[in-house]
Image (cartoon, grey):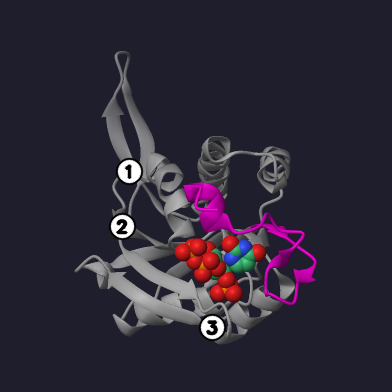
Amino acid sequence: MGKPVILDHPLIQHKISLLRDKNTGSKEFRELITEVTMLMCFEATRDLPLKEVEIETPIAVAKTKVISGRKLALVPILRAGMGMVDGALKLLPAAKVGHIGLYRDPETHLPVEYYCKLPSDIVERDVIVVDPMLATGGSAIDAIQQIKKRGVHSIKFMCIIAAPEGLAALTEAHPDVQVYIAALDQKLNEHKYIVPGLGDAGDRIFGTK
Ligand code: PRP
Ligand code: URA
């Protein structure tokens, strides 16, 4: 698979600066996550196959193109991944949505799974896993493992902010997964939070702190 793609479009960078600001409230934070996700999806779907069709315009028959090939599934990692679903579905309205619930144990920082519900036909779909944060990489690695267990071969992972440690762990564990990130930050702190990051994405999306 290709190297991780960093989607550093100026609009994305501007919106991430607003996301990082501790004074940005939940309503604006959610709207920004949706907007960044739409911009990222635009790039992350650049390789979707097309087929030629004929469409009658009011003037003539046009030979033109539509998306073809396999169907898509989105899999947000709960909770914070939920914040990216609306933006992705705006561009990919026919995608089915599965959910994987993981939280990081506050002591060990290891992911604990509490929910997994995936579309029954997921093996026939190309999957995009979404989560705004890639810190140690544990959550993404586990979620992708769950999806691979169902026989899925085509998986992309899209996150907004990544730590170098998490990116390295994810690409080592799943070298076949194409990774899209919008910002690669400096490091993890002693609590395994991304520095400078944006804090706890789930809490900021859902206003739980
Ligand atoms: C956050 C985030 C990722 C995970 C990243 O979720 O949304 O899923 O941490 O950390 P990792 O790369 O070290 O695994 P969290 O566990 O805080 O749960 P929440 O979304 O329910 O708040
Ligand atoms: N999860 C978050 O929401 N933020 C971090 O910085 C790390 C994990």
* Amino acid, disc 3: Leu
* Amino acid, disc 2: Val
Q: In 3D space, how far apart are the residues under numbered discs 2 and 1 (Cα atoms)?
A: 10 Å
Which range of residues does the magenta coloring cover? Answer: 182-209
Viewer-nearest of discs 2 and 1: 2
Q: Quadrant of residue 17?
A: top right
Q: Which residue is mark 1?
A: 93
Query: How crowded is the residue under tag 2: few (<14 C-alpha within 10 Å), some, or many (20+)?
Result: some
Q: Quadrant of residue 115?
A: bottom left
- Residue 110 position within the rendered picture, expressed as x and y whole percent measured from the top left: 54, 83
Q: In 3D space, how far apart are the residues under numbered discs 1 and 3 (Cα atoms)?
A: 33 Å
- Residue 181 position within the rendered picture, expressed as x and y whole percent measured from the top left: 63, 59
**192 lies above or below 23:** below
Q: Which residue is mark 3?
A: 110
Q: Which residue is mark 2?
A: 97
Q: Does residue 196 belong to the magenta stretch?
A: yes
The one nearer the camera, 190 or 121, is 190
* Amino acid, disc 1: Pro
The one nearer the camera, 187 or 170, is 187
- Residue 29 position within the rendered picture, expressed as x and y whole percent measured from the top left: 57, 41
Query: How crowded is the residue under tag 3: few (<14 C-alpha within 10 Å), some, or many (20+)?
Result: some
**112 lies above or below 118:** below
**Nearer the N terminus, badge 3 or badge 2?**
2
Asked whether the residues under the numbered discs 3 and 2 touch, taking CB atoms below 8 Å apart as contact, a structural biologist would say no
The one nearer the camera, 70 or 63, is 70
Element at label 1: loop
**Nearer the N terminus, badge 1 or badge 3?**
1
- Residue 131 position within the rendered picture, expressed as x and y whole percent measured from the top left: 51, 61
Looking at mark 3, is its residue's CB closer than 8 Å to ligand 1? no
Q: Quadrant of residue 127?
A: bottom left
